[in-house]
Image (cartoon, grey):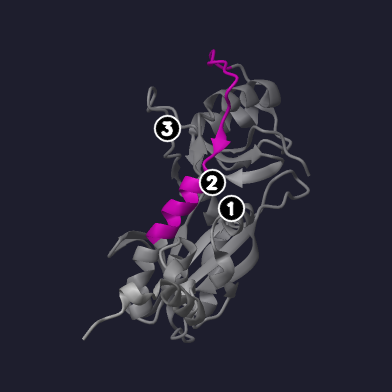
Amino acid sequence: MNFPKRPLELFTFSTESDRDREEWQAILDSQQCIYSDKKCFKTRKSEPEISIGTCTVGYKGEPIIICPNRFLQNDRIFLDCLHLLKNHEPGNQLHIASEIEVIGGNIDYFLVSARRQEVRDYVGIEIQALDTTGTVWPSRQQCIRDEIGISVKKFPRSSKTYGMNWKMTAKTILIQLHHKATSLELFGKHLVLAIQAPFYSYMSKVFNTSVMQDADEKDAVHFHTYNLPQEADGGFTLELSSRYSTTTVGIETMLGMRKDVEVSEEQLVARIQAKLSPETLLRI
């Protein structure tokens, strides 16, 4: 389906679903995120008491997630990492620990297998939603007024609407992924990046993803890509699309940090040989 360029989800509820104005008014008043069970953390700088609440927006016909909490629906991203807990045994408890510091920053979540509060195994999980350029606020207000039918305060009109900051988002998360995965790789553990399939498609065009392969549990770094199909009631459900993996060296190659590794010995010898001349001869 070709979705319009406007918010598709507000405070975790689909603007494509059939809800009356009273229901929407209650949703907008509560400003709650059902995935975090807290007030939406995305607030306006000029009005910090007002949460923006945009989880997903339409962009070039596709639903694009712009809030990391949106990936928490049904704990899907955690369940999709269970197979990486090699030391998990029947009887162990599963935990979700958040914001754990490692070299390179904090890892968003750890899926942990434990028995009597003693850690037996763990998997690091990073989430990356898309950063936007510009502001979504005018589109948000217009959606509430025109699609939902609720009056809103005047909002700025502009020919410039929001865009997607694909390149900066991709480069930033790859650098962070490399730093954070280095420690886990030394420990023989895994770090999983949960992203949307359109974001991975962009990475494949801009970065050297030849190092990526179908998910191999021997690799330290895993990419789990997700689609966001629309259900019959108009809502959206997170769904695992593909799994890939590589090593920290592979991430370096993607970032262009190891281009020299890609030079073959034959190419190297040819380059050396081209420099040889009587002037380069070492005289003894």
Q: Which residue is mark 2?
A: 166
- Residue 251 x/y as whole percent: 45, 67
Badge count: 3
- Residue 203 x/y as whole percent: 56, 56
Please name the amino acid that badge 2 sits on: Trp
**Mark nearer the viewer, 3 or 1:** 1
**Mark nearer the viewer, 3 or 2:** 2
Q: Which residue is mark 3?
A: 43
Q: Earlier in the sequence, mark 1 or mark 2?
A: 2
Q: Which mark is residue 284?
A: none
The reply to whether residue 124 is in sight is no
Considering every residue shown, the one lying at the far front of the view is: 278
Q: Earlier in the sequence, mark 3 or mark 1?
A: 3
Q: Measured along the vertical axis of the image, is residue 198 above or below residue 114?
A: above
Snapshot quadrant of residue 200: bottom right
Question: What is the CA distance from the residue labelled 3 to the residue labelled 2?
Answer: 22 Å
**Mark 2 Cα within 10 Å, few/some/many (few <14, many 20+)?**
some
Please name the amino acid that badge 3 sits on: Thr
**Mark 3 Cα within 10 Å, few/some/many (few <14, many 20+)?**
some
Q: Which residue is mark 1?
A: 199
Q: Earlier in the sequence, mark 3 or mark 2?
A: 3
Question: What is the CA distance from the residue labelled 1 to the residue labelled 2?
Answer: 7 Å
Question: What is the CA distance from the residue labelled 3 to the residue labelled 1?
Answer: 25 Å
The reply to whether residue 110 is in sight is yes
